[in-house]
Image (spheres, rainbow, N blue to C red):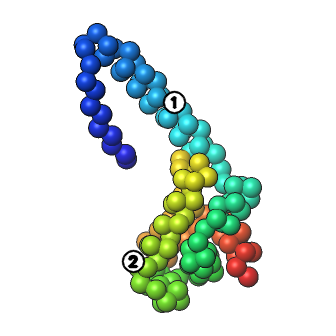
Amino acid sequence: MTKITITIESDIGELGPILGKLKELGEANKNTQDSLSSQEWTRQRVLPVWHDLSLSAQEILGVIAGNDEKSWEEQLRIVGKSGQEVGGSLSSLGAQLRNHGLRGITHPLFYNDAYGYRLLPIWKEIVLEQTS
């Protein structure tokens, strides 16, 4: 969760309208996040994000999509990179979710204790199409 600290220097009489405006901004942000989180991924949402990912992120997601039954250690071995290198490459995914205004929507990549990293089904389908 993001934390913002704001210092307001003002007369006490001017404080009410300022706080009211801050409250309005907070409610508008909450409404935007609520509506995004209720949305689902579609082809029309996945493809633009996919095309804007770094080549390294696309390669790693391709390995995950094709090997999601394997453990994280096995996925790393297939990718041929360290966990830190993979994390750095996959930061492209988070950046593109922000760039496309999709921060509140379900994250397409998640960790499964039994199998390692996996993709949401719509993402897996599209990633396999794009990397074959």
- What amino acid type should be assigned to the residue bearing mark 1? Ala
Question: From this viewpoint, which residue is outermost toward the top?
Answer: 13
Going 48% across and 66% down the picture, which residue do you hit? 91
Going 61% across and 64% down the picture, which residue do you hit? 120
Whether residues under marks 1 and 2 lie with C-beta atoms below 8 angstroms apart, the answer is: no
Count of labels in the image: 2
Going 53% across and 40% down the picture, which residue do you hit? 33
Q: Mark 1 points at which residue?
A: 28
Which sits in the foreground, 17 or 122? Answer: 17
Q: Where is residue 107 in the image (x, y as percent from the top left)?
A: 54, 58
- Residue 6 is left or right of residue 82, and the answer is left
- In the rendered image of this protein, does residue 21 appear above or below residue 75? above
Q: In which quarter of the image is the C terminus?
A: bottom right
Mark 1 to mark 2 CA distance (whole Å): 36 Å
Q: Name the residue under label 2.
A: 84
Q: Which of marks 1 and 2 is nearer the N terminus?
A: 1
Going 26% across and 31% down the picture, which residue do you hit? 7
Q: Where is residue 1 in the image (x, y as percent from the top left)?
A: 37, 47
- What amino acid type should be assigned to the residue bearing mark 2? Gln
Which sits in the foreground, 129 or 2? Answer: 2
Tell me if residue 7 can be seen.
yes
